[in-house]
Image (tube, rainbow, N blue to C red):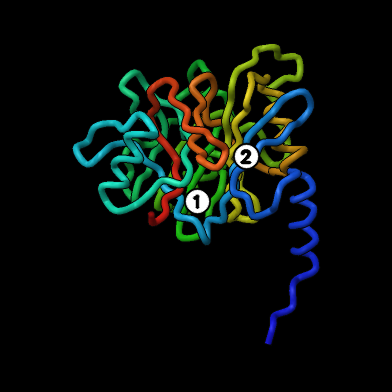
């Protein structure tokens, strides 16, 4: 017997297709918001193999999408999508929490300091067994979450449905920026601006256009995207943590 479609879900899919102006099945697409252009890539954590990467098998920081591609290909796997995934030091090591395959590579960083990472609240993007989330760092650390993958960054662009109070609409600094949010505990939305934008414009996009209750800033200026379906294989500055979606070739 042919199963009946859920009218609410079907309507939502049609709305999203109209919203983005492309077929709903596309994982990555470009769209415009205000005077700026962005790329969004969305994946279902239940159906996509989303992982975080840092070093190769010899302990050397990968640093680029091409190095990650080669490392995966050597294991009979292929890279479908990738993006830089958190801030790092001069050695390209994470400056905040980084968990890979269930192992803590770098502990959480709750110290005060200068720069975007320390702008409170900051947060953790995590993936575990078909689930994903963006969680404020303090709440993450006090929870019972022990995810397979996690990366800490900052600031939270949106927290509890509100734009971070430290992000002002009067800010004039414009940079290429990327971030992530999660809907319904499984739909992971990665976004990168295609041109320099302000912090507030980027946060506003997540709250208003994407309807995200919590969204995490990943970085600016070095923001890079690997999305073959968009013809993107960015090769900018060397990276630290990378998030990727893996598939069988």
Q: In the orientation shown, which residue stands out farthest toward the left? A: 58
At a point 47% along the width and 28% down the height, the residue shown is 234
Position in image of residue 91 (x %, y %) = 31, 22
Per the image, the residue denoted by label 1 is 143
Q: Quadrant of residue 155?
A: top right
Position in image of residue 163 (x %, y %) = 71, 31
- 149 lies left or right of 174: left
Per the image, the residue denoted by label 2 is 40
Q: Is residue 121 visible?
A: no
Task: Check disc 2: other Cα within 10 Å, few if <14, some if 14-19, many if 20+.
Answer: many
Residue 168 vertical placement versus 242 (above, below): above
Residue 246 vertical placement versus 6 (above, below): above
Residue 248 vertical placement versus 241 (above, below): below
Q: Name the element at disc 2.
A: strand
At a point 46% along the width and 50% down the height, the residue shown is 50
Q: Which mark is residue 81?
A: none
């Amino acid at each position: 017997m042919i199963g009946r479609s859920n009218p609410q879900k079907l309507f939502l899919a049609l709305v999203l297709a109209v919203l983005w102006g492309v077929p709903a099945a596309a994982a990555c697409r470009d769209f415009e918001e205000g005077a700026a252009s962005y790329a969004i890539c969305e994946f279902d954590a239940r159906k996509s193999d989303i992982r975080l990467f840092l070093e190769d098998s010899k302990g050397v920081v990968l640093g680029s999408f091409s190095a990650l591609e080669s490392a995966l290909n050597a294991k009979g796997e292929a890279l479908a999508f990738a993006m830089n995934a958190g801030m790092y030091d001069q050695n390209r090591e994470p400056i905040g929490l980084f968990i890979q395959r269930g192992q803590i590579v770098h502990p959480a960083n709750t110290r005060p300091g200068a720069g975007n990472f320390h702008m409170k609240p900051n947060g953790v993007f995590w993936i575990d067994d078909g689930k994903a989330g963006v969680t404020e760092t303090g709440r993450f650390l006090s929870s019972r979450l022990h995810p397979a993958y996690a990366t800490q960054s900052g600031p939270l662009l949106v927290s509890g449905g509100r734009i971070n109070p430290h992000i002002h609409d009067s800010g004039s600094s414009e940079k290429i920026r990327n971030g992530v949010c999660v809907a319904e505990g499984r739909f992971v939305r990665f976004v990168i601006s295609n041109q320099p934008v302000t912090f507030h414009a980027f946060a506003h996009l997540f709250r208003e256009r994407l309807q995200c209750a919590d969204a995490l800033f990943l970085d600016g200026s070095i923001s890079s995207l690997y999305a073959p379906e968009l013809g993107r294989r960015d090769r900018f500055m060397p990276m630290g943590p990378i998030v990727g979606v893996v598939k069988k070739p």
